[in-house]
Image (cartoon, rainbow, N blue to C red):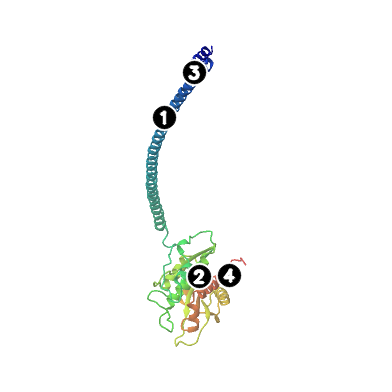
Amino acid sequence: MTTNNNSKKSKKSNVIYIDRKRNEKVNTNKNNLSKKSKEQKKNNNLNKNHNKEKENSNKTKNNNLKQKSSHKKINNKKNNSKKVSNNTKKDNNPQKHKSKKLRINKKIKIILSILLVIIVVFFGTKGVQKIMNKDTKSSVSISNTKDNESLDKNEIEKNQYDLKDEKKDVSKKYNIVIDAGHGGNDKGSIDSTDTIYEKDIALQIAKKVASKLGRESDVNITMTRTEDKYVSLEERAEIAKRANADALISIHLNAQKKFGDANGLETWYRGGATDGSKELAESVQQTTSAYIDIMNRGILQNNFEILRETTMPAVLVECGFITNVSDMEKIKNNKYQDMLAEGIMQGTLSFLDKKNGKN
């Protein structure tokens, strides 16, 4: 009985019992594991693919970036070339403008020069016509004289009266004749240095007197000579008569034969005259002596031809001694001559105003 039991027991030991549940579990685990592995493989594959895609996308991006950069470079080059071309165009434009401006300026200059020529020609022809139409008798011109070296020529010319500007007017009250003594080959007296002639100094002073009197609105002026030329005494008297003069003033310089010390101012009038010549001499002598620093030698009478042949109040003014060094130092001075002429002018007008009842 025992053996059977043992056999039974042994038999029992050789039998393999299978736990279905366990097997199922194992199988399920296996299945799960296989599934997981598969999924992992899939995932791995997916990841690989994804990575590849990423790489590809990155490559494409890089390529795109490269293309973009190349495009940008190309565009930049184009833009730079455009800028350069624009700059060249801009540079060319100022040159065109400059050339246009130069042309315009040239045209303007040409037009202006033409206008100036027209104006000069127009006024030149008018001036010539005026000169041609003027009466030669009433328009005696004053020319330049041989002035002394110590005198300023420009100042003398400014102070000289231009008879071209003097128009005879019927409404003017006084006609005055100014006579510059000597002239031409008649030199008059000579100073101690044998270089200064009476004719030249007399003309300088006479022009200044005429200039001052000519500025008066009611005075007509006539000069017997306006340049260094000879005019006879008869001609001088005739000029005064034709001018219907209210007064004649003859300008001279005194002289002493042996070059003594005689000096001073004196005025001469016609002896026995009843036409007012003495009164004119007094007025001129007193007024002129008051204007200049010189000895007053008073008035004297003499029948000088220029006084004798005239029929109006006439005087001969000896403005100082050409033979006296002291007098000549004064008379050569331009300002002194101005004051001398002012005194003669004021004395003449004062006499005429008194005579006509103005004062």
Residue closer to the observer: 39 or 348: 39
Q: Earlier in the sequence, mark 2 or mark 1?
A: 1
For label 3, the crowd category at 10 Å Cα-Cα, with few meaning under 14, some 14 to 19 and many 20 or more, is few
| Residue that mark 1 sits on | 52
Q: Nearer the viewer, residue 61 or 163?
A: 61
Residue 29 lies, in percent from the top left, at 51, 20
The residue that appears at 40% across and 80% down in the rendered structure is 195
Q: Nearer the viewer, mark 4 or mark 1?
A: 1
Using the numbered discs, state the Cα–Cα distance from disc 4 to disc 1 in whole angstroms.
133 Å
Q: Residue at x 53, y 80 (%)?
A: 265
The residue labelled by disc 2 is 209
Which residue in the protein does label 3 denote?
27
Mark-to-mark CA distance, 4 and 3: 165 Å
Chain-order first, disc 3 or disc 2: 3
Disc 4 residue type (three-letter): Ser
Rendered view: 122 above or below 247: above
Q: x, y (%) of residue 274?
A: 55, 73
- Determine the secondary structure under disc 2: helix
